[in-house]
Amino acid sequence: MINLSLNKPDTIGAIASGLCLIHCLFTPLLFAVQGLSTSYGSEMLSWWKNLDLFFLTLSVFAIYRSTRISNNILIKSALWISWVILFFLIVNEKISLLPIAELIIYITTSSLIFFHIYNLNFCQCKSDDCCAPKSKN
């Protein structure tokens, strides 16, 4: 059973990452539709362009809080590495530094969702070995 509660930072992180993924998937469609319409100015969806920065900010706080209560160093590292990659991809998209396929941002955001849900369900225990793989004796 998936454990989802809004008072847990992993839940907030998974939701923020999911909304970020939806935002990334729909952005090209919205701007294509806006481009076909001549009755609206370019300012119509300017707030939409910066919504990813809101999700990025929300996710950094969720990751910070999640890594403080997680027992697994690998999940902690995976959350931060995924966030740093996502940060680079979003900044790169804003300033057009390198041509990077949009698929990479989908994969990175999906990995954040996965790591938050995994951490929420398996890595918040009272003992240090609850998230570790069980050794065969």
Image (cartoon, rainbow, N blue to C red):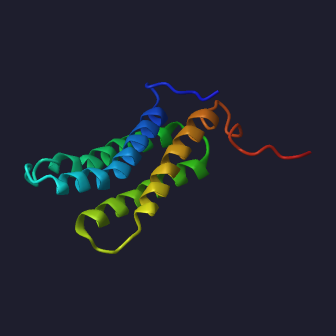
Residue 53 placement (x, y as % from top left): 27, 50
Nearest the camera: 43 or 39?
A: 39
Question: Residue 21 or 28: which is nearer the viewer?
Answer: 28
Q: Residue at x 43, y 42 (%)?
A: 18
Q: Which quadrant is home to the C terminus?
A: top right
Q: Residue furthest bottom?
A: 98
Residue 47 in picture, x, y percent from top left: 17, 46
**Which of the 4 image quadrants contains residue 129?**
top right
Disc count in the image?
0
What residue do we see at 67% from left, 39% from top?
Answer: 128
Examine the rendered structure and indicate whether residue 5 appears above or below residue 77. Answer: above
Drawn side of residue 8 relative to residue 27, left or right: right
Q: Nearer the viewer, residue 35 or 90?
A: 35
- 109 vs 45, left or right, is right
Q: Quadrant of residue 36?
A: bottom left
Q: Position of residue 93 (x, y in %)?
A: 29, 64
Work out whether 44 lies above or below 9. Answer: below
Tell me: 136 left or right of 113: right
